[in-house]
Image (cartoon, rainbow, N blue to C red):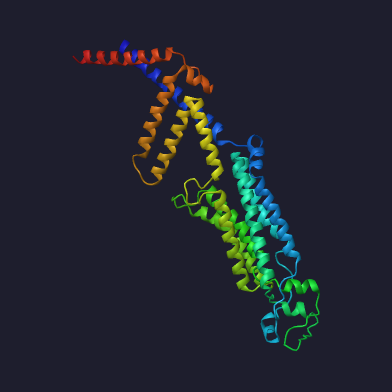
Amino acid sequence: MSEVLLFWNYVLQRREKNKKRKHLELEVSRTTEIELGTHTIKSHGAALAKNHMHDWLILLLLAVIEVILFIIQPFHRFVGKDMMTDLKYPMKGNTVPVWAVPMYAVLLPIAVFVLFYARRKDVYDLHHSTLGLLFAVLITGVVTDAIKNAVGRPRPDFFWRCFPDGKDVYDQWGGVLCHGKDSDIKEGHKSFPSGHASWSFAGLGFLSLYLCGKIKAFDRKGHVAKLCIVFLPLLAASLVGISRVDDYWHHWQDVFAGGLLGLVVAAFCYRQFFPSPFNDEGWGPYAYFKALEETRSNTHAASPVNALSVQVMGAQNVNERRRQNGDPFAALSADRYTSIRLDEIESGAKSACCLLGICRYQLKDKQCRLENDTMSRNVGNESIKNRV
């Protein structure tokens, strides 16, 4: 009977020890996440904005250039009588108004960025995604309007812009002598490339890449639903481009060129701040991981417990990648490494755990473990005697 009680007491003590270990592991994980993974606007926003002040000044310069390009007159390309066959489409209003383009190409993606910030509290992600989006849209706008003004291709409805009364007049060389509104004629020479298409694919294309990284669309797990989410912004941009052809404001070549331009610029601007969506770290900006490494280095020098917890997290991340690549021993390796590191944390006992404020182990805990080991040996010896 006494042996049963001793054994039961031993089991209870081991269970209590396991509970303490799990509690310690949970608290270390939470503390590490708070110390390493959270960068709010209040704590890092001012320094981040100051560090990228020159980028914001360049954005302001791009906005000024965009306004100038919009105001100046485009090149008035020669339009002959025999060319009017393809330029007599009726004048229609815009299915997608000009004022709506910044709403869905800029404000909508920023709203998505804010939602992710509200969840993760990562100011690096919010700042760099917003900065990258604005760069993508403004660079696209400047390039688009510069090409528009340089090419001066007439729109499909140019005839009615030039001759609103339907009476066409030509000079001695067969060129048009327009008598329509100056603003209509000016816009009539801005067909190539499509501004709606380029802005749409720049803003929504950037959003698509952002979502692709955030939801880990290419994590090799075969979740097609993630691809559907990624394709939604691109579908919206495509529909905007199609509407430009349906409204006879652009030729299909204008829309194709504008969409391609917007996508290319969006991809370049996205990669300036974020890893590839195919990368395992594609869910966060470069600056976040850089700040994380700096914090880990400082934590390693300041606190041995935090350093060990960071090593545990690092090993778990490595083994998670190994599991994704099909390594059947990754889970065993991760558990063993975590157990070893937690034993190191517990062996530090008094001084190490007080640094985290998680628990206050006393030196008697070592004595308790020695007693448990002794008890285990005694139970084993008693069992051998009974068998004999």
The x, y position of residue 160, in whole percent, is 75, 79
Q: Is residue 365 visible?
A: yes
| Count of numbered tags | 0
Name the quadrant containing residue 43: top right
Q: Is residue 339 above or below residue 185?
A: above
Name the quadrant containing residue 156: bottom right
The x, y position of residue 120, in whole percent, is 59, 40
Q: Is residue 273 left or right of residue 352?
A: right
The x, y position of residue 362, in whole percent, is 46, 14
Q: Quadrant of the N terminus?
A: top left
Q: Quadrant of the C terminus?
A: top left
The x, y position of residue 348, in whole percent, is 44, 20
Relative depth, front residue between 62 and 87: 62
Name the quadrant containing residue 159: bottom right
Residue reaching furthest to the bottom: 172
Q: Is residue 79 above or below residue 116?
A: below
Relative depth, front residue between 181 and 249: 181
Residue reaching furthest to the left: 388
Relative depth, front residue between 2 and 346: 346
Relative depth, front residue between 374 and 38: 38
Identify the residue at horizontal 40%, vertical 15% (top origin): 366
Q: Is residue 23 visible?
A: no
Identify the residue at horizontal 43%, vertical 21% (top origin): 346
